[in-house]
Image (tube, helix red, strand yellow):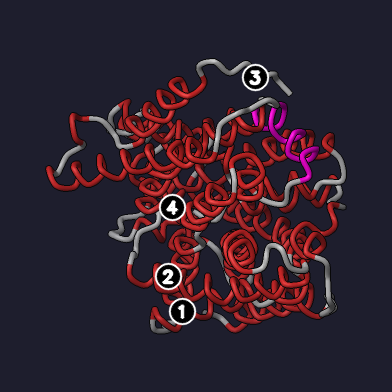
Amino acid sequence: MHFIDLLIIIAYFTILIWVGVFSQKLNNQSSENFILSGRRLSFLSFIATLVTTWYGAILGIGENTYLYGIQTWFIFSLPYYIFATIYAFFIAPKIRESGYLSIPDHFNKHFGKVSGILSAILIILLASPAPYILSMGILIQYFFQFNIGISLIIATLFSVIYLWNGGFSSVVKTDFFQFFCMFLSFFILLNFLRNNLGSPYEMYIKLPNQYTNPLGGNTLQYILVWFFIAAWTFIDPSFFQRCAAAKTPKIARNGILIAIGFWAIFDTITIFCGLYAIEYLKTDQPLLTYPLLAIDFLPVGFLGFFLIGIFAIIMSTIDSLSFISAITFGRDILWRIKSEKENKEYIVPFIRLGLIVISIISLLLAYFIPSVVKLLFTLGSIIIPALILPFIISLIFSDIQINEIEAIFWIIIPLIISIFWLFLSKYTGVNFLKIEPFYPGMISSFLYFISIKRGYRWQLK
C-alpha cells in the first residue's frame, strides 16, 4: 500500500475517534439520553444513521453478486424496500408514540418480565455484530498482513471505543461522517470501472444468462426465504432505536422513506460494481470482490478513499449493533434481573458492562464462525419466527389480553420448531421435507396465535 493511501486511512480513523470520543463529554447521562440521545434525533441525522447502519454486509453483497449476479438485488434490496415502506407507514409512528426504549422493553410491558428477557436474549443473537467484525477483520488482515486474531481485535476496538462516552449520540455523529465516505468510495470505483471496462449497459449485455436470472441458479423457495427474512426489518433493533429517538413520528416515517431512496442508489452502484467483476476477476475469494477490483483499477490516493468507504460501511454497523446488544444485555437483562426496582442510575453502568461482554462474545463468534451470509441466513431463519408476530400484533392492537405464560410459549414454540427443523436438515444433508426452517417456524407462530386469540376482541390502535 502506498504511503498516501495509508495517510488517508490514518486521517479517517483520526477524524472518527475525534468525532466519536473527544467531541463527547463523559458525564452522568440519563439512560434515555445515553440510549436515544434524549429523543431529539433530527431529520438529516435520522436518515444518515439509518442508511449507514443497514450496509454492514457489504462484502457479502460483493460475494453474492460475483457468484449469482442480479439475484442479489432480489434478495438483499427489493424485499427490504417493501418491508421498510410498510414499516414507515404503519410501525415507525407507533414506536415513537409508545415511549419504549427497546424491543425487549416493549415485550416486557405487554407480556411480562420473562417474555422481555427471552426477547432480549434473541435480540442479542439477532443483532450480533460478529459477522461485521469478521468482515472488518478480514479486510485488515488482507491489506495490512496482520494475524486474523489481531485484526479482529483492532476491528472491534476502533468500532466501539467511542460508544463508552457518548452512547447513541456518538453513533449518530460518526454515522454522519461515514455516510459521505460510503457513497464517495463506490462512486469512485464505479467511475474507474466504467472508464476501463465500458459502460454498465455494455458490461451487462455480455453477462452469461445465469447472472441475469433473478434466481441466480437457486430455487424459488430459497429466494422466497430471503424475501421473508427481510421481514427482519419489523423487529430490527436498529430501526426501533432510531424511530424511538426521532423528534417526532413524522420524522421517523419520512426519514425511512428518504432512506429507501438512498439505499436504492447505493444498491445500484454496488451491484453494478459486482457485475463488472464477473467477467474481469478470476478469484477463489469472492468475499473480497470489491477490494480486489479496487486494487486493480484505482490509482494511488483513490484506493485509500475507497478503503475508508468500505471501513465506514462496516464500522457504522458494528458500532450500532454493538451498542444495541450492550443495551439489550445491560438494561434489558441485567438491570431487569438485578436492579429494576432500584434507581435508574444503574442502567448506564450496566450498558457499559454489556459493551465489554458483547465485544468479547462477538470477537469469539467472529473467530470461530468465519461465515457472513450463512450466519445471517441461519439466525434470521430461526429467530424471526419467534419474535415478529408477537411484536407486530401487540404493537397494532390496543386491547391485547394474552397472559405471560401464553406469550412465553408464543416465543418459544416457533423457536424450537425452527431449530429442530434446522437440525433435521443438517442431519439429512438437505432441507427436511424440502422446506426451509423459516416456514414451519412462521406457520407454528401463526397457528398458535389463532389458537389463543379466540374469545378476544381487540381494538386497533
459 is within the stretch colored magenta: no
Q: Secondary structure at mark 3?
A: loop
Q: Residue 154 placed where, x, y %?
A: 53, 80
Of residues 84 and 381, the one nearer the viewer is: 381
The reply to whether residue 203 is in sight is: no
What secondary structure prevails in the magenta region? helix
Rendered view: 215 above or below 329: above
Task: Specify whether 412 is left or right of 434.
Answer: right
Q: Say few, some or many: other residues with alpha carbon within 10 Å of mark 2 (under 14 / 14 to 19 / 20 or more).
A: many
- Judge depth for marks 2 and 3 and give the one in front: 3
Q: Residue 330 placed where, x, y %?
A: 61, 67
Q: Secondary structure at mark 1?
A: helix
Q: Which amino acid is tagged 3?
A: Trp
Mark closest to the chain's N terminus, 2 or 3: 2
Q: Which amino acid is tagged 1?
A: Ser
The residue lying at 56 percent from left, 80 percent from top is 2
The residue lying at 50 percent from left, 38 percent from top is 407
Q: Which amino acid is tagged 4?
A: Gly
Gap in angstroms between the C-alphas marked 4 and 2 = 12 Å
Gap in angstroms between the C-alphas marked 1 and 4 = 19 Å
Residue 97: assigned label: none
